[in-house]
Every structure is written in structure tokens, then in C-alpha cells.
Amino acid sequence: MGILNVTPDSFSDGGRYTDVDAAVEHGMALHRAGADIVDIGGESTRPGAERVDAATEAARVVPVITGLAAAGVPMSIDTTRAAVAEAAIAAGATTINDVSGGLADPAMAAVARDAGCPWILMHWRGHSRDMNQLAVYQDVVAEVRAELLQRVDDAIAGGVAPRQIIIDPGLGFAKNAEHNWELTRHLDVFIDLGFPVLFAASRKTYLGRLLADAGGNPRPVDEREAATLATSVLAVAAGAWGVRVHDVRGTADALAVWRASGAPRLAPEK
Ligand code: PMM
């Protein structure tokens, strides 16, 4: 999954693709580079981000989706709002990527049900402005698993078919670095739930912290790619269905090496 944020303020590609033509061109490039799906976002979810209104969000994404649909590029819509998802699907998106797992907007389940499309349910505890305070767990793996299963149950109760559901542990969303590593170590717990698992670590803050310099300054966002590639290979080797990344070409290359190597799937620590 290639990332295309049509926002002025996303942490990695914010501000780069606010022009429709540039965004469509980049989406096509991501697809050519090997993205099976391009994830279009019109609202930044970086920690602390303020929200935009639904009309602004839809106005950012719909022209880009229309352009990419005409070019035959498969797309997901990265939104927590049912109205934006509905407009995006009408314009040609074929998957809903909801970082709130249906919690932010109770109308999302009906949109997913009526569209019959895949719905990515990410683990989430609250909007970006507040999420750092919500990063409190006794047992992060068990709690994220239980809370995700609740999202799945609610989706199914809302009429969504189990085959539509993809789950995502939500790295960095109400999680600190240690929580992210713990979830990475136990990805098998999520894979064992039987739904496809999306892993989305690309260039996130915890990788910057891991690679901090001697003075403790985090590695800048655009210098976290090698670490991102390592996380993607490890996640796919552990059985993840997909990885959501900024550098699609690099990811495709790294996964080609992993595949050609014939390396076995990683066995979880039991
Ligand atoms: N992270 C971001 C945005 N959308 N969607 C899913 N399913 N999982 C994620 O972890 C996720 C997401 C934030 O990163 P970005 O600013 O690079 O888009």
C-alpha cells in the first residue's frame, strides 16, 4: 500500500501533494512502482494534529481519487468519516482505511456494508490531539487485541461481512515506542485472529527515536527509510497481509529479495 497524503501537514509527505495534478502523478508513480493499492488521505493524523472539517477533507481527496480512478489505480480512502468515505467510494476508491476502526463515526459501518468493500479497522483510542495521553496499557498486546476484536464485533453487528475486514494494530496511535515494539514482536497474535493484517510503520516517530544520534536527536523523517524497509520485511515474513509505506519501490525491492531468498516465515516466540 502506497501512501498519498493530500494534506498540508502530514508528518512525512505533508504539503507535497496539495496540487491535484501533482497528487495524481504521484499516485500513478506509486502504482507503477508496485503498490497494489494507493491510500489517499485528506486529514493528517500525526500526533497533536488539529482536525479539518468534512467538506475540506472531501474537497482534498475527491478530485485526486477521480483522476487516479481514470488511470485505473486501485485506491483506499484513509478517513474516519462516513461522508468522506462515501464520496471517495463514489469517486472510485475501493477500500476504506479507517484509523478509528469505526469508533469515530458510527455511520461508517453502514457505508462499508452497503459498498461491500474491504474495511481496514485500525486500533485507535482517540483523535490525534489527545492520543498521546491514551497510551497507557498494562499489557499492550492483550489490550490492543481485545479492543480490535470489539471493533470487529461491532462491524459485523453493523452488517459488515467478516471477509471485508482487515485489521491493523495502529502503530503510533495512542502507543509509545515500547508499545510499538511489543506489538511488532507479537504480530503473530494478530495474524492468528484470522483476518488479513496491515502493518504501517513507515517513517514513524519511534523509528526516528531508535536511530537517534549521540545527542539524543531523533533521525529526521526522510532518513528513516532503511529502518522502515527492515520493519516491512519482518512484518511480511511474520505473515502480514500488507505494509503501508511511503517508498513503494524500495519496499517492492526488499520484498523481492525476501521472496527470492526462500527465507521461511518467521516463527513466533512461544
Ligand atoms: N498511519 C497513518 C495514517 N493512516 N492507516 C492505517 N491503517 N494504519 C496506520 O498506522 C496509519 C494509517 C499516519 O501516517 P502518515 O502520516 O504517514 O499517513
Image (spheres, helix red, strand yellow):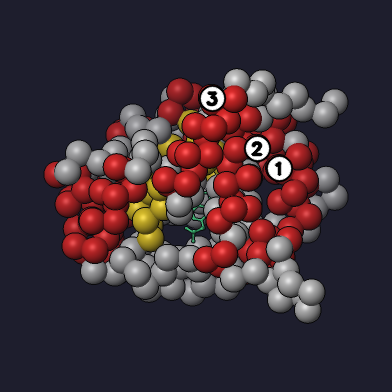
Q: Nearer the viewer, mark 3 or mark 1?
A: 3
Q: Mark 1 = which residue?
A: 184
The first of marks 2 and 1 along the sequence is: 1
Badge 2 density bin: few <14, some 14–19, many ≥20, Cα 10 Å: some
Identify the residue at image location x=48%, y=65%: 12
Amino acid under disc 2 = Leu
Amino acid under disc 1 = Thr
Q: Quadrant of the C terminus?
A: top right
Q: Mark 3 = which residue?
A: 260
Q: CA distance from mark 3 to mark 2?
A: 15 Å
Label pair 2/1, CB-CB below 8 angstroms: yes
99 relative to 172 in the view: left or right: left
Identify the residue at image location x=23%, y=69%: 19
Q: Considering the numbered disc 2 on the image, is that residue within a helix, a strand or a loop?
A: helix
- From this viewpoint, is residue 67 visible? yes
Q: CA distance from mark 2 to mark 1?
A: 9 Å
Q: Mark 2 = which residue?
A: 234
Q: Quadrant of the N terminus?
A: top left
Q: Considering the numbered disc 3 on the image, is that residue within a helix, a strand or a loop?
A: helix
Q: Would you place residue 49 above or below residue 192 in this image?
A: below
Q: Nearer the viewer, mark 3 or mark 2?
A: 3
Q: Nearer the viewer, mark 2 or mark 1?
A: 2
156 relative to 181 in the view: left or right: left
Q: Would you place residue 68 above or below residue 190 in this image?
A: below
Amino acid under disc 3 = Ala
